[in-house]
Image (cartoon, rainbow, N blue to C red):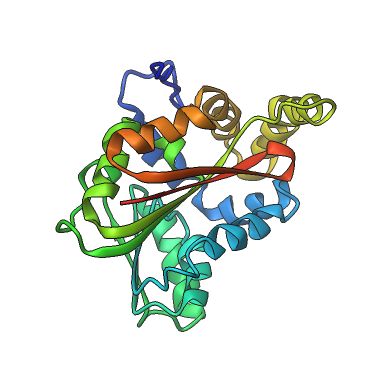
Amino acid sequence: MSSIREVKPFQEINTTKKQQVEEMFDSISGRYDFLNRFLSLGIDITWRKKAIKELVALNPKNILDVATGTADFAIEAKSLNPDKIIGIDLSEGMLSKGRIKIQEKNLGHLIQLVKGDSEELPFEDNIFDASTVAFGVRNFEHLQIGLNQIYRVLKPGGKIVVLEFSKPKTFPVKQVYQFYFKYILPMWGKLIAKHETAYEYLPASVQAFPEGTEFLSYLTNSGFTQVKHQPLTFGICSIYTGIK
């Protein structure tokens, strides 16, 4: 398993990746949901639905959504009819937007959002039936530590579902994808979010992320078994799963 090249939102500033990720998402939280739909052409909604289906057979009652952001995945998980969903994220700006959405959908009885760190989850061992992470693991400062923490708080038999960007390998999807990520996405990010750095960080972080079988090795090292990798939409995105 190779080491991960660290990519930070503000490479020239001497603060931790964790601090920079929090600052970046706080600054773009107001336009984050719109940009997600706009820049993914709405495909991210389909990806989340596919990832949620990975948990249907498990029928989880207590779900932890790590790096929950504005709570899109936590809200989608209500279709599983759980008793409780807890979303955790570093960015208070993102969480505040998520709380508004939860209130508007009258889901306050079901979904709780808390500010916290994926590497120091403030929960006891063996209490969640399932944990999800959507487009968040590549933002972990220490990937293995974050996955170890998720493993710790899952019950035996609990399942992790990770949804993350990956890099398509086939022509011409690979070339179109690279052009879009390198030129189009940062341009629109600068125009709409007024934050060019955030949308330069996105492709850089995807490029550095250990995808496919390499990421499965991180899951295995944390203790997960039956690890699987499912590419979506020509390899633009992937679903990873594992069982404690």
Find the residue positioned furthest to the right.
172
In the picture provided, is 186 more to the left or to the right than 13? Answer: right
Q: Is the N terminus in the top left, top right, bottom left or bottom right quadrant? A: top left
Total marks in image: 0
Between 34 and 151, the one lying in front of the other is: 151
Q: Is residue 58 left or right of residue 200?
A: left
Residue 51 drawn above or below residue 10: below
Query: Looking at this view, is 228 or 38 the one in front?
Result: 228
- The image shows residue 132 at horizontal and vertical percentages of 42, 55
Give x and y (percent) for residue 234.
74, 39
> Which quadrant would residue 69 be assigned to in this image?
bottom left
Between 157 and 160, the residue placed more toward the observer is 157
* Residue 17 in view, yes or no: yes
Where residue 159 sits: x, y (%)? 38, 56
Q: Residue at x 48, y 75 (%)?
A: 80
Residue 129: which quarter of the image?
bottom left
Q: Quadrant of residue 45?
A: bottom right
Where 132 falls versus 200 (above or below)? Answer: below
* Image location of residue 237, percent across then percent down: 63, 42
Q: Nearer the viewer, residue 198 or 117?
A: 117
Q: Is residue 18 visible?
A: no
Q: Is residue 222 left or right of residue 48?
A: left
Residue that lies at the very extreme toward the front in this rendered image = 226
Q: Residue at the spot x=32%, y=59% of the render?
A: 158
Q: Is residue 128 above or below residue 193?
A: below
Q: Residue at x 16, y 56 (%)?
A: 125
Task: Kindly identify the residue that appears in the image at 56 percent across and 64 percent down.
Answer: 53
